[in-house]
Amino acid sequence: MIFIRGFMQFLRWAVLLAAVMATAPAHAQLFETKAGQAFMADAETGTILFSKDPDKLVPPASLAKLMTMEVVFHALKEGRLTLDDTFQVSENAWRTGGAASGGSTMFAALKSTIRLEDLIKGVVVQSANDGCIIIAEGMAGSEENFAALMTERAREIGLTKSVFKNSTGLPAEGQVVTTRELVQLATHIWREYPEFYKFYSLPDFTWNKITQRNRNPLLAMDIGADGMKTGFTEESGYAIVGSVSRGGKRLFAAMSGMTSERERSEESRKLLEWGIRAFQKSELFAADEVVGEAQVFGGERSGVPLKAKGPIAIFVPITNKDRLIARIVYEGPLSAPVEEGTKVATLRVWIGDTLSQETPLYTAENVEVGSLHQRAWDAVQELMVGWLR
């Protein structure tokens, strides 16, 4: 711990000096994976622990069912639905998503009625396509209408790139997601719907006298996994969204582009276990502590202190501590007058070549317009050094 404290003091010093316009440092990744795309983040601090082509648009396959469930959970939370509501199995749902389709199914009987809670378990545990379509038709009248709700809701929770065309994730032109947004979605479900998130850890579910095991291979690995979903398409390969809670840490990871079920299981396990073991949480700045200073042009003072709204905590690599870099980034100098509480900068923290955390910084004081002499001197300085920016 003595070395950790010394490193954190060094990092604070580096942050205070590095209040500049910055670009990402060039470093190699701290971890290698066979996945084509991958993204992993800590749920509490938002620290990005790993990133590999995270914004590439890929078909979601059954990972789209996470968004299907978000729409359902949101309606339950708002009181528009209850777990005891029942939905009827249409012929379309039975044929398109049932046993005859050859895909994942909960074997819902034609024209039967099913409680919403059972449909949710069928979708979450068994990845039931028929369950998704039954819900979609019951909530929106058609799967097409429900898919529009999925995309609309995605935008509401901050997913700007993902587009949904159906409730199941079955191949459809224009249906795409990113691994970054899948982690964002998974974290949102965990945070906003804890009473429903627990369904993702169920080991099995029985419907129509047929018991099926949860398709998530991480649940059987004794690594602290409790979610969330697997998927596969011919176009993008094998994919997974996984979550692990262990040792006071909660991590979410999304991976795509793997070549087999075995590779998916091994790569997701290795990434999540590395995330749990390779990082240690550290508080970089306490609440109300000055993070750095921004230059001010034409003010009564030449600088203004910067603070975050609350403490800044990050996950520091236990090894390769020198691979963590922090910089304050802003467009400056600021022009006086400067009002206290104005967002003017961002603290950016890199782990290797991954931009791991961005924290908004705000002015901690007012800076009034300076005297004529002060403004003239600032103008001279700006002429002398402004061209270097």
Image: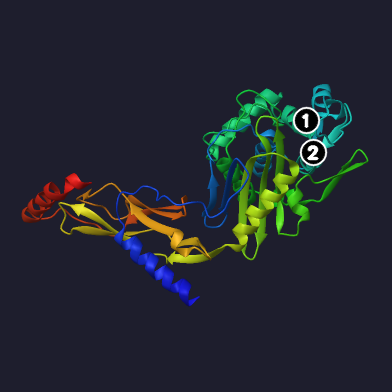
Q: CA distance from mark 1 to mark 2?
A: 8 Å
- Residue at the extreme left: 373
Looking at the image, residue 361 sits to the left or right of residue 155; the answer is left
Residue 114, compared with residue 325, is above or below; it is: above
Please tell me which residue lies in front, 297 or 7: 7
Give the amino acid at mark 1: Ile
x then y, percent, for residue 212: 86, 43
Q: Residue 119 has which mark?
A: 2
Residue 146 visible at all:
yes
Q: Position of residue 43 (x, y in %)?
A: 57, 54
- Image vertical order of residue 130 relative to residue 374, above or below: above
Label of residue 21 in the image: none
Q: In the rendered image, which residue does mark 1 sit on? A: 134
Q: Please, what secondary structure does the residue beneath circle 1 have?
A: helix
What residue appears at the point 71 percent right and 28 percent down from the top-left corner? Answer: 170
Residue 144, placed above or below residue 20: above
Q: Is residue 292 above or below residue 71?
A: below
Give the amino acid at mark 2: Leu
At label 2, counting other C-alpha atoms closer than 10 Å, the crowd grade (few under 14, some 14-19, many 20 or more) is many
- Out of 248 and 38, give the one closest to the viewer: 38
Residue at image coords 22%, 58%: 303
